[in-house]
Amino acid sequence: MNRLLYPLVASALITIAPFLITFENGQDIVRGIFGYSEFALLLLFVWVKVGACHPERSVKREVEGSRAVKVLRIAAMGIIVVAMLVVAFMDLSNLLAIKGWDMSWRAVVPVATCGLAVTMMWKIPAFSFPTINLIVFVSLVFHLAAYNFYPAQPVAQFPVVEYLARTAPKPVERKVLREEFKAKYAVMDTAIVTPGFLDTTRSNVLVLVESWGIPLDNQAFDAELQIFRDVGFAEGKDSDGFGRMQVGVHSRMYSRTRTAEREDLVYSLRRDSVTRRRDTTFTPNVLAGLGYETYFFVGLDSAVQWRHKYIRNIGFKNVNWGTGCKDECIVQKMDSVLNATAVGLSYDSAGGDSTQARKVFAAWTTTESKFPLKDVDPYRISMADLEVLYPAAIEKTLKRVADLARKHPEVRFIVQGDHEPILSPLPFQERFYKRWTPYVVLN
């Protein structure tokens, strides 16, 4: 029992002493009872000093007596002591960083406590190496189990983890919108915004723009919105809604196109109070029940994002796939649908006869700005190239949408981004807010 008690007490000494010399009345600092790293290093120190060789074997005795092994053992012990000192200094610096104090004379404390700990362990019998592994593992499990029951007092302290977390480079805050941004644009902290903008008195078009996120640079976002203004849209322009533009941002649950596509098509969510099962009603099904013709457009194969498994099931009667049909081709098809409705006809994607005029609900997922960008090697693209190619792709897509919406002022357009450019290189991703996307409502 003493063999285990001594390293526990020694590691507790190294951990508690810095806490005591920095203690102030009223402070709220949660600390473990013993240092986990120091505890493991002390067990290893004794094993290297005493138990690395087994004297009961004659061959081992010969090896133990060799000068080379003694030198290696002394060197290993020195490395362990230095590692212990480094951990102790990390622990002290973590506390001083919280207080905002300098190290100064307090640097003596880690040296003194580590020296006392080594002295305490000098004549303690060693555990075998497998036993040390077991003790360290059980200690970690015990700490985690106890922490679940009583988090106010952890059993172990992990100074190395705390030090790395404190000193590691802090990424740009991307999940929280800046105050000046929230003051300028409407912010909705929900993934489902489409139902609030639907107009059931006329046709509606839902556009999901691939990889359209919100830049951290407000001017870059305003430049994207200028594309709509340049074709005649403005916030609160006309009382009847024609030429009017409403801009805002909303959150996403995940940075995935498939999830965003489904979120935008959700009409309502209900959870059974007994079974807790979720019942989802989708917009295409609801509008189809109101007499709408429903269309889905995407210039990709039906297997991409597994759309073939759910697009028709959620209410789309007319589905237009096409690996050879890019965004400009999709715009022409949608224009035909809206033109046919405007002149008293309904468009049949299979080329059938015209029927009585009906309102239309069309959903289009764009592909122009999909990563990897077309004709570009995703593994060799430079930041300089991305700064040109990505805005150009977004601009081209938004210009197509703006022109189509301006051509059909009788149709409500709801334009949203699916996610930030999540498949771009990490330095480029960090220029955008995470899981926040824009929406623009036209007409």
Image: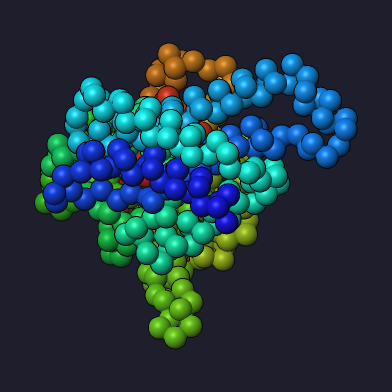
- Pick whichever, 87 or 296, lies toward us: 87
The part of the image, by quadrant, that contains residue 66 is top right
Relative to 304, is 17 on the left or the right? Answer: left
Quadrant in which the N terminus appears = bottom right
Relative to 235, is 357 on the left or the right? Answer: right
In the image, farthest residue toward the bottom: 274
- Pick whichever, 11 or 175, lies toward us: 11
Q: How many marks?
A: 0
What residue is drawn where x is 48% and y is 34%?
119
Compared to residue 139, the image places residue 111 above or below, namely above
In the image, farthest residue toward the front: 123
Q: Is any part of residue 309 visible from this angle?
A: yes
Compared to residue 7, the image places residue 82 above or below, namely above
Relative to 282, is 97 on the left or the right? Answer: left
Q: Position of residue 275 (x, y in %)?
A: 48, 83
What residue is drawn where x is 88% and y is 30%?
59
- Pick whichever, 58 or 153, lies toward us: 58
Q: Is any part of residue 211 visible from this angle?
A: no
Compared to residue 245, the image places residue 432 above or below, namely above
Applied colour scheme: rainbow
Q: Position of residue 96 (x, y in %)?
A: 25, 33
Q: Position of residue 429 (x, y in %)?
A: 42, 30
The part of the image, by quadrant, that contains residue 356 is bottom left
- Pick whichever, 178 or 302, lies toward us: 178
What residue is drawn where x is 16% and y is 40%?
179
The part of the image, by quadrant, that contains residue 202 is bottom left
Q: Position of residue 147 (x, y in %)?
A: 42, 60
